[in-house]
Amino acid sequence: MQIGIDKETLTQELRRLGIARGMDVLVHSSLSSIGWVEGGADTVIDALLVAVSPAGTILMPALNGSPQDSPQNPPRMDVRRTPCPKWIGIIPETFRRREGVRRSLHPTHSVTALGARADFYTEGHEHCQTPCGVGSPYVKLMDNGGYILLLGCTQQSNTSLHALEELAEVPYHLQDEWTDGIVIDTEGREIVVRNRLHLWGWERDFTKADEPLREAGAMREEMVGNALCRLIDARAMREVLLPALRKDPLWLLSDRARERFSWSWQS
């Protein structure tokens, strides 16, 4: 019989990583990386909630944007029914379905939340001009001393780096035209969300963020189960990386994409 990791062990290891009561934590996750967990995704969620309870908040991405999103093909999201995509893992979808979880009203980059400040983080996302920019849950987390947990995944999963791209106004990240996306709220009402959506196709190398975050002491790394995990101070991440991105707007692109974009930009 395979022996799994239980909730108590997970909670202890999350606390060793640095997660404490009262924290607000945006979680990106890979269940398979952790190893065999007794009770699966629900056990991971329970451990996260115990680790931050009673005054903390757990947030997770509930992304559903696609390369096809455009003014001609506007995205549509129903907060009650639209699932999280499989590529972000089973934990966010299990969390989305949990009783009491709130979901922000955004057609491509919504966030779910449960805990003391769930309403604060999810409200107003529909009024933001970009998916992850000023007023979004991602920037609110930076403003309010929150943390980002990469639970068994790398910086490539760190959506908050898109927030820094938007704050820095990098030239490759957003579509030129505005799109009127549709969100259906909990009451079944259709809300038009006017945004400059993400422009897909430019390959990122978000792993570049690791070294400066380590050097600044803005990130802790520990094993949780079988997974190397990163706990990032969201405000410190902005303080460390945003100046670098403003100095070199192409910094977060892969070398190949950087070369391709530089050529097209100059042309």
Image (cartoon, rainbow, N blue to C red):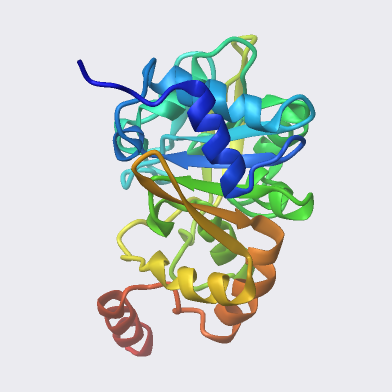
The residue lying toward the viewer, choosing from 240 and 37, is 37
Q: Position of residue 56 (x, y in %)?
A: 74, 32
Q: Residue at x 31, y 65 (%)?
A: 203
The residue lying toward the viewer, choosing from 45 and 221, is 221
Q: Residue at x 61, y 40 (%)?
A: 15
Image quarter of residue 66: top left
Q: Is residue 157 left or right of residue 247?
A: left
Furthest residue in direction bottom, as rendered: 266
Q: Is residue 123 above or below residue 226?
A: above
Q: Is residue 256 visible?
A: yes
The residue lying toward the viewer, choosing from 80 and 217, is 217
Q: Position of residue 236 (x, y in %)?
A: 69, 65
Total marks in image: 0
Q: Is residue 233 left or right of residue 62?
A: right
Furthest residue in direction left, as rendered: 1
Q: Residue at x 52, y 84 (%)?
A: 248
Q: Is residue 14 above or below residue 144?
A: above
On-image quarter of the C terminus = bottom left
The residue lying toward the viewer, choosing from 153 and 63, is 153
Q: Is residue 131 visible?
A: no
Q: Residue at x 56, y 70 (%)?
A: 213
Q: Is residue 265 above or below residue 113?
A: below
Q: Position of residue 201 (x, y in %)?
A: 30, 60
Q: Is residue 1 above or below residue 126?
A: above
Q: Position of residue 158 (x, y in %)?
A: 47, 53
On-image quarter of the N terminus = top left
